[in-house]
Amino acid sequence: QVQLVESGGGLVQTGGSLRLSCVAPAAVFSLSTMSWYRQAPGKERELVAYQTTGGSIDYRSTVKGRFTISRDKAKNTVYLQMNNLMPEDTAVYYCNSRSSEEFWGQGIQVTVSS
């Protein structure tokens, strides 16, 4: 059973910052594109950002300039630095790894109060 373990969520005011972390098994992390998704109540899950093993990065347009994804190979960890948070960023955030197989984290709540 592959586990992706997320941490770093919580409650923050509008304009605040949070950093999410996701630790993956080394064998998974080294071969996988690592992504962050989110799902707000009543909405579909959406891709927030991803980083490939080669370092390519992309973001959904609504978070560009505010969120930064990064990978730490030594710690088998992917991060999502979220700055200037807005109420519409409120969601459960999920870590995802994808290579020949796909795995998900359990999800972590991020709540931005207005």
Image (tube, rainbow, N blue to C red):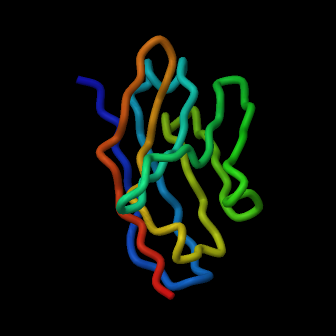
Total marks in image: 0
Residue at screen point 65% across, 35% down: 51
Q: Residue furthest front?
A: 42
Residue 16, compared with residue 60, is above or below; it is: below
Q: Pick out the residue farthest to the top.
A: 100
The answer to which of 103 and 3 lies nearer the viewer is 103
> Could you say where residue 24 lies in the image, as x and y percent from the top left?
41, 33
Up-down: is 89 above or below 45? Answer: below
- When asked about the image quadrant of residue 25, the answer is top left
* Quarter of the N terminus within the rendering: top left
Nearest to the observer: residue 113 or residue 4:
113
Q: Quadrant of residue 108?
A: bottom left
Residue at 47% x, 11% y: name it: 100
Residue occupying image coordinates x 30% and y 33% = 3
Q: Nearer the viewer, residue 49 or 77?
A: 49
| Of residues 43 and 113, the one drawn nearer to the viewer in this rendering | 43
In the figure, residue 86 lies in which quadrant?
A: bottom right
Left or right of residue 102: residue 81: right
- Percent x, y for residue 114? 51, 88
Residue 63 drawn above or below residue 79: below
At which x and y percent is residue 2? Answer: 29, 26
